[in-house]
Amino acid sequence: MCGIIGLNFKPKESFIDIINIMKNRGIDNISYKDINGNHFGHTRLSIIDIDDEANQPMVFDDIVIVFNGEIYNYRELKKDEELVCQTKSDTEVIIRLYQKYGIEFLNKLNGAFAFCIYDIKIDRYFCARDRYGKKPFYYYCKDGKFIFASMIKPIIKSIGFTPPLNKIALSQYLQYFTPLAPNTFYTNILKLDSSSYLIYENGNLLIKKYYQIKTKKIIYNEDEALKSIEDTLLKSIEDRMVSDVEIGSLLSGGIDSSLVSTIYSKISNKQIKTYSIGYEGMERYSELPFASIVAKDINSIHTAIYLTQKEYISCIDEVFEALEEPHSDHASIPLYFMTKMIKKDGIKTVFSGEGSDELFLGYNNYAKFYEYYRFKQTLSKEQKSFLKQNLKNTKTTTKEIEYLKRVLNDELIYNSFGEIFTLNQKKRLFKKVPQFSYFKEKKDPIDWMSYIDLKVWLGESLLSKVDKISMANSVECRNPFLDVNLVDLSFKIDSKLKLGDTNKYLLKKIALKYIPKEIVSREKKGFNSPYNEWLNKEFKDDILNEILKANKLHNLFDIEYIKELYIASLNNKQKQHIYSLWVFSRWYNINYG
């Protein structure tokens, strides 16, 4: 994977210094080109075609490209489309497809990518991002200046000032863990939405979607569904084994990573390297014993990493620096430490299990919310009116009460798995809540929950965290469950069949063929950590003071509600709320204090 940047003007700062901000995204080569006053830079992590011929910016026939990512079907495309290439890289394949089809080739690509093609003859920037948001793409377009990059900091350095706080981004962050595209925390620095492309030409900006998930059901038979899922997953993992460097595998001991690691081990027919993490003195958060069972079963070279409180605390500043803007997922800290150790072990690329929960209904929340949708269908107008009247004056702000109010008010019931502050809680927190548009709910609640989590919880939150944190340590993560063929397949399966009688019903049946039964039947744990205990022990009341210090500057929050949340967090309740406020406040005090 790599870092990319381009701008249509000469920055005041040294361009090579700007590119070097992204050096951890690509430690193998740093290059740049100036073409008619347009500047392009690239930092390369060599994984496919590690020869110098594949370095970027790459130029062929008046076409310039800077590309971050992997195209897993590039060899098939090269053959099927009869493309004549001078290098063995997937980068040149993108150029040749553009020359053959113009901008209409994007849906041919199967991979994780963000790129910019600059067409010299017509002075046009054509930029695109993959379907599910695996690779980042930020841009700035104002006063005739156009900048794009894999990170935010090079854009800030290019424009020469820190933009004001985007309050809509803050409101989204407190609800969804992170701002939603196109917002970032910086006004006028935007992120291209997943499955979208951008054209900048003659001073004009055009943004369009090139891919939409379709939910038409065509698979109603369980045996057919199981065979299709298994075959497609096997092909996805095989495709992602394309690499000129060794690939490791993250192994938590859950179904997803265990299944991927096992299939990878079988297909490769070699002893693979696997990695897991645990917490010293905090065994209840650890999944190391389960990871050990799978590692032994597949005979992997397994590394169990133990994170201490001291190491956890020492990582915080590096993690927040890598994330660039507030991100509420506390799992970013152990992930950072783990990828740091993986890098030391000489591994550049690892498999990871993201996407399975969203596609195959792995979260317990799905069954719970499905009951809210079913309950809504049973209510008459009179019953709705009666319940609304009884709940009208309640001051309780529990999430369960709010979900019930959503049912009665015909509002969006399910907002995403990672919802932190609900709308009512934000009304208590903010003196004036910054408003933003919500999503249009799909009719089928199973499709809706799967779709919105794929879009928001996974696409905006988890994948951005994984990319930024792993690439800060020059490690690339590959996600077999996010193969376009597997995603499309999952939405073709009848919803009730997919729901079954347990979470991840269909995938568990497949998993029983590959991994030990005790792993398949264990209770889902998730990638958790003792963040609340360790942060409170280290920082104590400085957590609250950090939030209050920031609030003196921006004056956006209700102080009494903040204090109420802080007291609750000391008792291990609403801890995610106070963590989100603390992360934002720490960032705000550094950037605007």
Image: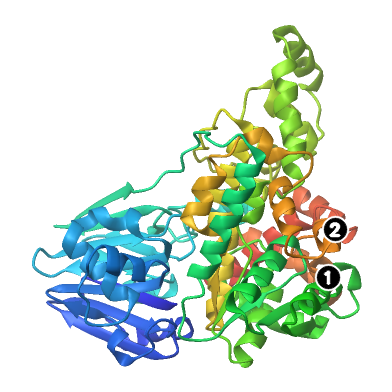
Q: Pinpoint residue 177: horizontal percent, then vertical percent.
A: 62, 56
**On the rendered structure, is 148 left or right of 505?**
left
Q: Is residue 508 above or below residue 25?
A: above
Identify the residue at image location x=67%, y=53%: 357
Identify the residue at image location x=77%, y=77%: 295
Residue 217 marker: none
Identify the residue at image location x=57%, y=59%: 233
Q: Is residue 520 above or below residue 446?
A: below
Disc 1, SS: helix
Disc 2, SS: loop
Q: Is residue 226 above or below residue 586?
A: above
* Quadrant in the picture for the C terminus: bottom right
Q: Pinpoint residue 297: horizontal percent, then vertical percent.
A: 79, 75
Q: Are marks 1 and 2 in contact (CB under 8 Å)?
A: yes
Q: Pinpoint residue 422: horizontal percent, then vertical percent.
A: 68, 41
Type of amino acid under label 2: Arg
Q: Dot 1, how many residues are within 10 Å of its Cα: few (below 14), some (14-19), or many (20+)? A: some
**On the rendered structure, is 54 left or right of 588?**
left
On the question of residue 302 being in view, the answer is: yes
Quarter of the figure with residue 50: bottom left
* Quadrant in the picture for the N terminus: bottom left
Q: CA distance from mark 1 to mark 2?
A: 9 Å
Q: Is residue 398 above or below residue 529?
A: above
Residue 522 marker: 2
Identify the residue at image location x=44%, y=74%: 153
Q: Dot 2, how many residues are within 10 Å of its Cα: few (below 14), some (14-19), or many (20+)? A: few
Which residue of the protein is positioned furthest toward the left in this rendering?
121
Task: Between residue 574 and residue 434, name the one nearer to us.
Answer: 574
Task: Between residue 486 and residue 575, name the one nearer to us.
Answer: 486
Disc 1: which residue: 290
Quarter of the figure with residue 530: bottom right
